[in-house]
Image (cartoon, helix red, strand yellow):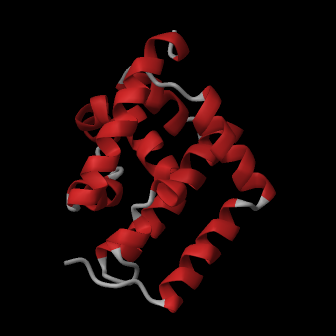
């Protein structure tokens, strides 16, 4: 049976939510949601290697945010039940679904086996996370041909 969430965990979830409301973070999240539709590892690497560009900043900002957030669930600071609610981390699923098909190649090209590793461990290490991710990944895969062209 999953651990019962605490009031302190709920406060941390709300603080994480508040961080997402910061104006630049909103722009970064919007870019990930609507504009950034990589169709291959090279699409991702083009942005990842364009240091100083707005898109590179947004790529790293959102990726880092979710990397930090997933450490909380991986280390038992926030319960899986609370963390993996789609209302809180649906964006994590959406972002990860966009890169998962070429994640191995991204890691090889970046020479960094840890790219998106925390997100991957959190999602696949949880039955609840996997189940929710599968639903979102199906929608992303349906949208990908229309958006990534």
Could you tell whether 97 is left or right of 107 in the image?
Answer: right
Placement of 103 over or under 143, stated as above or below: below
Find residue 137 and report its horizontal and vertical position in percent: 35, 34
Residue found at the far right of this picture: 23
Q: Residue at x 39, y 61 (%)?
A: 84
Q: How many marks?
A: 0
Could you tell whether 93 is left or right of 31 in the image?
Answer: left
> Looking at this view, is 71 or 126 the one in front?
126
Could you tell whether 44 is left or right of 106 in the image?
Answer: right
Find residue 7 and report its horizontal and vertical position in percent: 52, 90
Find residue 144 and report its horizontal and vertical position in percent: 45, 19
Residue 33 seen: yes
Q: Residue at x 47, y 19 (%)?
A: 143
Residue 114 seen: no
Placement of 7 over or under 15, stated as above or below: below
Quadrant containing the N terminus is bottom left
Find residue 87 and report its horizontal and vertical position in percent: 53, 56
Placement of 76 over or under 53, stated as above or below: below
Could you tell whether 77 is left or right of 10 in the image?
Answer: left
> Looking at this view, is 65 or 56 the one in front?
65
Q: Within the image, what quadrant is residue 28 found in? A: top right
Q: Residue at x 45, y 89 (%)?
A: 6
Placement of 82 over or under 51, stated as above or below: below
Q: Residue at x 42, y 28 (%)?
A: 139
> Looking at this view, is 103 or 18 the one in front?
18
């Amino acid at each position: 049976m999953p651990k019962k969430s605490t009031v302190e965990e709920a406060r941390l979830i709300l603080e994480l939510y508040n961080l997402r409301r910061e104006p630049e973070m909103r722009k970064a999240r919007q870019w990930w949601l609507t504009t950034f539709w990589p169709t291959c590892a090279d699409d991702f690497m083009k942005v990842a290697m364009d240091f100083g560009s707005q898109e590179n900043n947004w790529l790293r900002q959102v990726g880092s945010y979710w990397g930090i957030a997933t450490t909380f669930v991986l280390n038992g600071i926030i319960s899986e039940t609370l963390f993996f609610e789609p209302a809180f981390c649906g964006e994590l699923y959406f972002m990860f679904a966009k890169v998962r098909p070429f994640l191995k190649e991204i890691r090889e090209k970046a020479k960094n086996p840890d790219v998106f590793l925390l997100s991957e461990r959190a999602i696949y290490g949880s039955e609840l996370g996997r189940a929710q991710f599968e639903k979102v990944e199906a929608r992303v895969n349906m949208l990908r041909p229309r958006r990534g062209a």
